């Protein structure tokens, strides 16, 4: 076991699996044809401090559950087949750490092809997904709520080809995260905000980068609001619709943050990408300034992002090559 410090947080990292291509398969099926009917029951069946890959394959259905992947259960993948037909939903509003439909506290978690939804609505904070574990990745997921949809809280995270929607500060927290080829959609009929990044010190290596993403909205929207004094958000090669307001960014009512936040874009395009009307304390990056934000190296991704397993085994040790679960 190794304790890794990251920003102001530390994470317990258990020894990794020797074989990253093979996972223990657990099937969740509401019809009763799997190992469990509920996703949480499948998670609970995994031993604490496991050092093997576990692949929880969720059959299509609407799963009305509040899910927690605890800190002592790393190396878990939870996967549907298509996000549109594998839906995890709950309805809870109030405090941000109490409301999430899906909470990830463990390291080395992967979510694939899931819809994660908090259906509470716009009247209170209602988190769909909270990610507080280091080295978490999400592929092809739909993350849906209104206010504070995605609590990208702490650790290094990667989101690929995900659809994320909300109205107010719908991606927020102090993670160090790369969003690649994602769709970000504002539901606000007034003025919404995509991000509220909470970096509080220049020493913290945190922030959000959006690479090759598409930004749309019903009303108007801001790229970000400065929750933390050193808030850091960068949009790179993103398509921005005319929903994006010319000023782009907001200081959360505190002009002292103008000299400490890092808000920038690089080679974005579309009617909302024009930098001529941006607030003076935001940046338009040069090629050399943008270079660190163009690869997964910014989150150390080469060291921890892993492909889906290709071989599966049951706990009895019998090998089951299940291509459909990949």
Image (spheres, rainbow, N blue to C red):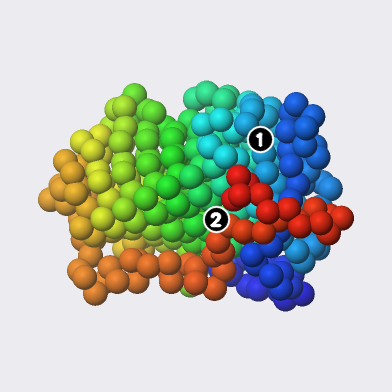
Residue visible at 54% across and 65% down in the picture: 305
Q: Is residue 239 left or right of residue 164?
A: left
At 31% from the left edge and 32% from the top edge, which residue is drawn? 217
Residue 306: x and y in percent read: 56, 64
Q: Which residue is drawn at 23% across and 38% down?
A: 241
Image check: 121 left or right of 103?
left
**Front residue of 307 and 177:** 307
Task: Examine the rendered structure and indicate whether residue 194 appears above or below residue 261.
Answer: above
* Residue sitting farthest toward the left: 276
SS type, badge 1:
loop
Depth check, front residue: 220 or 56: 56
Asked if residue 49 shows in the view, the reply is: yes
Quarter of image, res 106: bottom right
Q: Position of residue 253 (x, y in %)?
A: 36, 45
State the image quarter where residue 231 is shown.
bottom left
Q: Distance between the residues labelled 2 and 1?
A: 20 Å
Quadrant housing residue 5? bottom right
Vertical placement of 27 versus 261: above or below?
A: above
Q: Earlier in the sequence, mark 2 or mark 1?
A: 1
- Where's the N terminus, which quadrant? bottom right
Asked if labels 1 and 2 touch by Cβ distance under 8 angstroms, the answer is no
Neighbour tally class for label 1: few under 14, some 14-19, many 20 plus, Cα within 10 Å: many
* Residue at mark 1: 59
Disc 2 element: strand
Rate crowding at label 2 as few (under 14), some (14 to 19) or many (20 or more) other CA atoms within 10 Å. many
- Residue 179, labelled with which disc? none
Q: Which numbered dot is residue 137?
A: 2
Task: Give percent across and percent down for residue 30.
Answer: 74, 28
In the displayed structure, does residue 46 sit left or right of residue 288?
right
Residue 107 in sight from this viewpoint: no
């Amino acid at each position: 076991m190794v304790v890794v410090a990251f920003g102001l947080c530390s994470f317990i990292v258990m020894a990794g699996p020797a074989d990253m291509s093979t996972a223990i398969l657990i099937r969740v099926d509401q019809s009763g044809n799997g190992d469990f009917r509920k996703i949480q029951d499948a998670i609970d069946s995994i031993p604490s401090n496991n050092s093997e890959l576990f692949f929880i394959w969720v059959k299509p259905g609407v799963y009305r559950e509040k899910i927690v992947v605890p800190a002592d259960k790393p190396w878990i993948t939870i996967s549907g087949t298509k996000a549109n037909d594998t839906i995890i939903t709950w309805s809870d509003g109030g405090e941000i750490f109490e409301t999430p439909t899906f909470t990830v506290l463990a390291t080395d978690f992967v979510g694939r092809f899931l819809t994660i939804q908090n259906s509470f609505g716009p009247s209170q904070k209602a988190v769909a997904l909270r990610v507080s574990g280091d080295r978490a990745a999400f592929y092809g997921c739909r993350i849906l709520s209104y206010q504070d949809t995605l609590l990208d809280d702490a650790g290094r995270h990667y989101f690929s080809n995900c659809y994320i929607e909300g109205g107010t500060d719908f991606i927020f927290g102090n993670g160090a995260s790369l969003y690649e080829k994602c769709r970000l959609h504002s539901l606000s009929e007034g003025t919404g905000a995509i991000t509220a990044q909470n970096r509080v010190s220049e020493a913290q290596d945190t922030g959000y980068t959006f690479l090759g993403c598409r930004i749309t909205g019903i009303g108007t929207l801001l790229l970000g609001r400065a929750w933390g004094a050193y808030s850091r958000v960068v949009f790179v090669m993103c398509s921005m619709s005319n929903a994006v307001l010319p000023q782009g960014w907001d200081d959360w009512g505190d002009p002292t943050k103008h000299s400490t936040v890092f808000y920038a874009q690089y080679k974005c395009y579309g009617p909302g990408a024009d930098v001529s009307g941006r607030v003076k304390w935001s940046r338009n990056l040069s090629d050399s300034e943008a270079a660190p934000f163009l690869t997964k190296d910014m989150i150390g991704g080469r060291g921890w992002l892993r492909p889906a397993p290709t071989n599966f085994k049951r706990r009895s040790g019998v090998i089951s090559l299940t291509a459909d679960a990949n």
